[in-house]
Image (cartoon, helix red, strand yellow):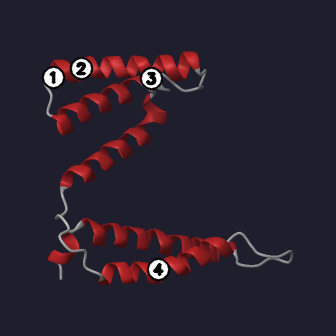
Amino acid sequence: MLARLLYPTPIATLLLAGVAIGFAVGARRLGFWTEDGPGPGLLPFATASLLLPLLVVVLRERVPEEEPFRAMPLAAIVLTCTYAAVLPYVGFLLPTFMLVVAWVRLFHRQGWLRCILLGVGLTTAGTIVFDILLNVPMPLLPTWL
């Protein structure tokens, strides 16, 4: 049974079930009904209530010829979440450069020179597009500088 859980479908199903349970608990705290009508927790609770039985069916089904779980997609998710977490505190330039360098080096197995050139080029392009052309307010440098 444990070996069957090491495939992407059961892992994604269990993670989605955790999210659905979180929505159900949060929805219960918000309340289902108010004096005026449906409360803010009714729709999330209904969604979670409909999603959980479907996830049980998906978890019980066996996908034929499914490839085993690989760590590379998980590493990409962790790298992207880390980037999103540090961006507000460290600014745009350094995390973007480091994300591109790490991504190209780890996932595409390129040399250091290409990684650094791509990091500088894509960070510069992102800065030009978002900061200069679109005037998106974002911290380019760390907030503590």
Query: Looking at the image, is mark 3 or mark 2 earlier in the sequence?
Result: 2
> Amino acid under label 1?
Trp
Q: Position of residue 7 (x, y in %)?
A: 22, 68
**Is there a contact, CB below 8 Å, between mark 3 and mark 2?**
no
Question: Quarter-wise, where is residue 125 in the image?
Answer: top left
Mark 2 highlights which residue? 116
Residue 52 - label: 4
**Is there a contact, CB below 8 Å, between mark 1 and mark 2?**
yes
Secondary structure beneath label 3: helix
Question: Quarter-wise, where is residue 64 in the image?
Answer: bottom left
* Vertical placement of residue 108 versus 76, above or below: above
Distance, label 3 to label 1, CA atoms, is 21 Å
* Vertical placement of residue 61 versus 119, above or below: below
**Dot 2 alpha-carbon crowd within 10 angstroms: few under 14, some 14 to 19, many 20 or more:** some
**Dot 1 alpha-carbon crowd within 10 angstroms: few under 14, some 14 to 19, many 20 or more:** few
**Dot 3 alpha-carbon crowd within 10 angstroms: few under 14, some 14 to 19, many 20 or more:** some
Distance, label 4 to label 1, CA atoms, is 46 Å
Distance, label 1 to label 2, CA atoms, is 6 Å
Question: Quarter-wise, where is residue 65 in the image?
Answer: bottom left
Distance, label 3 to label 2, CA atoms, is 15 Å
Query: Looking at the image, is mark 4 or mark 3 earlier in the sequence?
Result: 4
Mark 3 highlights which residue? 126
Q: Is residue 114 left or right of residue 133?
A: left
Secondary structure beneath label 1: helix
Query: Looking at the image, is mark 3 or mark 1 earlier in the sequence?
Result: 1
Q: Is residue 123 left or right of residue 3?
A: right
> Amino acid under label 2?
Ile
Q: Is residue 62 left or right of residue 138?
A: left
Mark 1 highlights which residue? 112
Give the residue drawn at x 49%, y 16%. Answer: 128
